Image (tube, grey):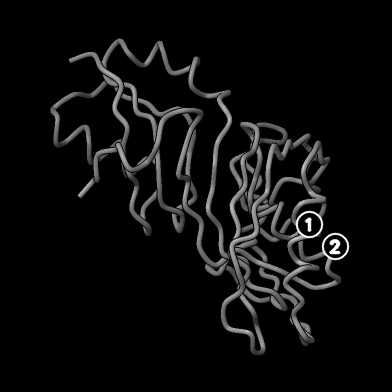
């Protein structure tokens, strides 16, 4: 079997868990993907089966689209709600226009540190391994991340911790957790990702993908 599959990853499993399940289901060992999703995230993954794994390099660098919910007033060590809260701040009155303006001003090329809880390697070791060891001598590298567009979709729970709903069209290699923290910084608030869904990779849409379950 040689083919490219478009799969809708559910929350709560790793990208390699997706591969593991498909290997078992299809009875094919040779398999790979064109970009990971964090365990808490959902959405589109491109899977290469058999000799089609050779074609994955053509998909890896494609731009991606994400829907994201960002909690204001809270920062975690992982950049998402699965992590430990390391900072909290009272959120004042939320101004929708100010949020929309802040999001739109993020369009362009940004130089941001990748999250410590990521698979980026330093010295042959993944950053999340350093983070779990609480090795503070290692700093995450700064990476160029391009935001092609940013759309404000609304605010939920206008109480202690408002949730900003937005979508981003970004370059390959962009970490939405890093964008969320930068967005919060520009508002003068800690911020973390509550929900993240990859809806599109270039022209490939998640609504046309195969549910994993």
Percent x, y of residue 37: 47, 45
Labelled disc at residue 207? none
Q: Is residue 53 above or below residue 79?
A: above
Q: How many residues crowd around disc 2 within 10 Å: few (fewer than 14), some, or many (20 or more)?
A: some
Disc 2 is placed on an element classified as helix
Residue at the spot x=62%, y=66% of the render? 70
Task: Looking at the picture, tell me which residue is in the foreground, 1 or 209.
Answer: 209
The residues tagged by marks 2 and 1 sit, at their Cα atoms, a distance apart of: 6 Å
Q: Quadrant of residue 84?
A: bottom right
Q: Is residue 129 left or right of residue 8?
A: right
Q: Is residue 139 above or below residue 125?
A: below
Q: Is residue 12 above or below residue 85?
A: above
Disc 1 is placed on an element classified as helix
- What residue does disc 1 label? 182
Q: Is residue 146 left or right of residue 202?
A: right
Percent x, y of residue 127: 66, 46
Q: How many residues crowd around disc 1 within 10 Å: few (fewer than 14), some, or many (20 or more)?
A: many
Task: Looking at the picture, tell me which residue is in the foreground, 67 or 77.
Answer: 67
Q: Residue furthest front?
A: 97
Whether pointer 2 and pointer 1 mark residues with C-beta atoms closer than 8 Å, the reply is: yes
Q: How many numbered dots are placed on residues in this image?
A: 2
Percent x, y of residue 120: 64, 38
Percent x, y of residue 45: 39, 36
**Dividing the image into 4 quarters, which one contains the N terminus?**
top left
- What residue does disc 2 label? 186
Residue at the spot x=14%, y=36% of the render? 25
Q: Is residue 188 left or right of residue 170?
A: right
Residue at the spot x=64%, y=38% of the render? 170
């Amino acid at each position: 079997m040689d083919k490219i599959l478009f799969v809708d990853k559910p929350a709560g499993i790793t990208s390699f868990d997706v591969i593991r399940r498909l290997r078992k289901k299809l009875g094919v060992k040779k398999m790979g993907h064109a970009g990971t999703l964090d365990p808490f995230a959902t959405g589109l993954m491109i899977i290469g089966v058999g000799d089609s794994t050779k074609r994955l390099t053509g998909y890896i660098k494609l731009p991606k689209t994400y829907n994201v919910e960002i909690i204001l007033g809270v920062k975690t060590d992982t950049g998402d709600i699965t992590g430990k809260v390391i900072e909290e701040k009272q959120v004042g009155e939320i101004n929708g226009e100010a949020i929309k303006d802040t999001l739109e001003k993020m369009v362009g090329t940004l130089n941001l540190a990748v999250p410590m809880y990521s698979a980026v390697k330093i010295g042959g070791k993944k950053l999340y391994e350093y983070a779990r060891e609480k090795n503070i001598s290692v700093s995450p590298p700064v990476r160029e991340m391009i935001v092609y567009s940013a759309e404000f979709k609304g605010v939920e729970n206008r109480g202690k911790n408002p949730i900003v709903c937005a979508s981003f069209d970004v370059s390959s290699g962009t970490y939405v957790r890093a964008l969320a923290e930068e967005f919060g910084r520009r508002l003068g608030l800690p911020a973390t990702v509550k929900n993240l869904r990859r809806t599109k990779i270039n022209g490939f849409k998640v609504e046309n993908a195969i549910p994993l379950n």
